[in-house]
Image (tube, rainbow, N blue to C red):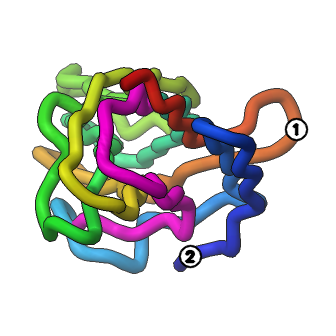
Amino acid sequence: MTGTASSIHIGGSGFAVLPAGVDLMPAASGAWIDLGLSLALPTAGTYHLDAVVRGNIGRMSTGENAYVAARLWDVTAGAVVPFTEAIVVQIAEFAGGAATALQWNDSAAISVEYAVTSPRTVRLQASRVDIAGTTEVAGIGSGGIQQTTLRYARVA
C-alpha cells in the first residue's frame, strides 16, 4: 500500500513527491495508512509544514456518505502533528433512488507551523471513512495533472 517517495533536501527545506497512487480500499474504514511519503526535519526548530493531497472516492450504492482524510504524523513522537487532519474528498448522496455510479476527485492542502525540540520524521497518512453505504474506490493519487507532495521549510 505504500510507495517510495522521491525527496530533496536543500539547506533548511525539504520536498517530497508521492511517486504513485495508493489504494485505500484494502484497509478497514477509519484505519490510517502510511503513504510512503515522509521528510526528516534535521534539527530542533520551528518549521512550516505543507502538504497537497489528491484523493478520489467512488461508490455504487444509494445513501452513500464517505470521505478520504489526510494528516501529518510525527513518527519520532508517535503522535499526530496538531491541526493537520483534513478532509481531502467526500461523497454524500442521500436520495432514495436507484444506485448510481459516482466517483469524485479533489485535493486538500495542509499547512501548519510546527516547533520541535529535536530532529523528527514527519509522515503523510490517509484514511477512508465509510459513514453509510458501500465505497467501491478510494485512494490517494499522484501523477499526471496533480502530485501529492510534502514540504518543510525551517523558519526559526
Q: Nearer the viewer, residue 91 or 2?
A: 2
Q: Position of residue 18 (x, y in %)?
A: 68, 55
Does residue 57 appear left or right of residue 141 in this picture? left
Does residue 154 appear left or right of residue 22 in this picture? left
Q: What is the secondary structure assignment of the residue under circle 2?
A: loop
The residue that appears at 35% across and 68% down in the rendered structure is 33
Instruction: Give amino acid for label 2.
Output: Thr
Q: Position of residue 100 (x, y in %)?
A: 46, 35
- Residue range highlighted in magenta: 32-49
The residue that appears at 52% across and 36% down in the rendered structure is 152
Secondary structure character of the magenta stretch overall = strand
Q: Nearer the viewer, residue 135 or 128?
A: 128
From this view, report whether residue 92 is shown above or below residue 67: above
Q: What is the secondary structure assignment of the residue under circle 1?
A: loop
Residue topped by disc 1: 144
Categorize mark 1 by other alpha carbons within 10 Å: few (<14), some (14-19), many (20+). Answer: few
Q: Given contact means CB atoms under 8 Å apart, are the residues at marks 1 and 2 in contact? A: no
Label for residue 2?
2
Q: Position of residue 153 (x, y in %)?
A: 53, 30
From this view, report whether residue 42 is shown above or below residue 35: above
- CA gap, disc 1 and disc 2: 18 Å
Q: Residue furthest right?
A: 144
Instruction: Give amino acid for label 1.
Output: Gly
